[in-house]
Image (cartoon, rainbow, N blue to C red):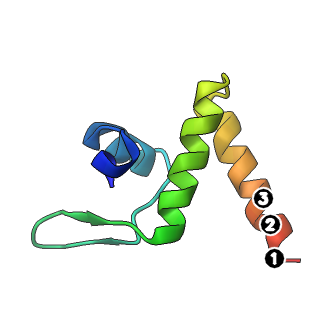
């Protein structure tokens, strides 16, 4: 996914560490991270928001708010 979205593997690991974008699955033997199609789209949103100056904390809050609203 890193190549497809033009981010580094380190960026994806950081997003996982801070709880911004958790992988759908992590292979326990290899540590390889798997992401769903919807997470691919979320990463695109994260990149767009970063490009216009949102902090990672602001993006995390935005995504949390959006997920809460979509449940109703």
State the residue at coordinates (33%, 55%).
Answer: 1
Q: Which mark is residue 71?
A: 1
Q: Which mark is residue 66?
A: 3
User: What residue would you read off at disc 2?
Assistant: 68
**Residue reaching furthest to the bottom:** 72
State the residue at coordinates (57%, 55%).
Answer: 42
Task: Evaluate if marks 1 and 2 touch, with contact meaning CB atoms under 8 Å apart.
Answer: yes
Between the C-alphas of marks 3 and 1, the distance is 9 Å
Horizontal arrangement in the rendering, residue 71 relative to residue 41 (left or right): right
State the residue at coordinates (41%, 51%).
Answer: 16
**Residue reaching furthest to the front:** 4
Residue 20 in view: no
**Residue reaching furthest to the right:** 72
Q: Nearer the viewer, residue 19 or 47?
A: 47
Q: Which mark is residue 10?
A: none
Horizontal arrangement in the rendering, residue 10 relative to residue 51 (left or right): left
Task: Evaluate if marks 3 and 1 touch, with contact meaning CB atoms under 8 Å apart.
Answer: no
The quadrant the C terminus occupies is bottom right
Task: Evaluate if marks 2 and 3 touch, with contact meaning CB atoms under 8 Å apart.
Answer: yes
Q: Position of residue 68 (x, y in %)?
A: 80, 66
- Looking at the rendered structure, the secondary structure element under dot 2 is helix
Q: Nearer the viewer, residue 70 or 6?
A: 6
Label 1 packing within 10 angstroms: few (<14), some (14-19), many (20+): few
Q: Position of residue 61 (x, y in %)?
A: 72, 45
Instruction: Classify 55 as above or below 9.
Output: above
């Amino acid at each position: 996914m890193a190549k497809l979205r033009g981010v580094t593997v380190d960026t994806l690991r950081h997003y996982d560490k801070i709880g911004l974008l958790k992988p759908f699955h992590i292979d326990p033997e290899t540590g390889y991270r798997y992401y769903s199609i919807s997470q691919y789209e979320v990463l695109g949103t994260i990149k767009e928001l970063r490009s216009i100056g949102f902090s990672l904390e602001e993006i995390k809050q935005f995504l949390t708010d959006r997920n809460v609203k979509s449940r109703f």
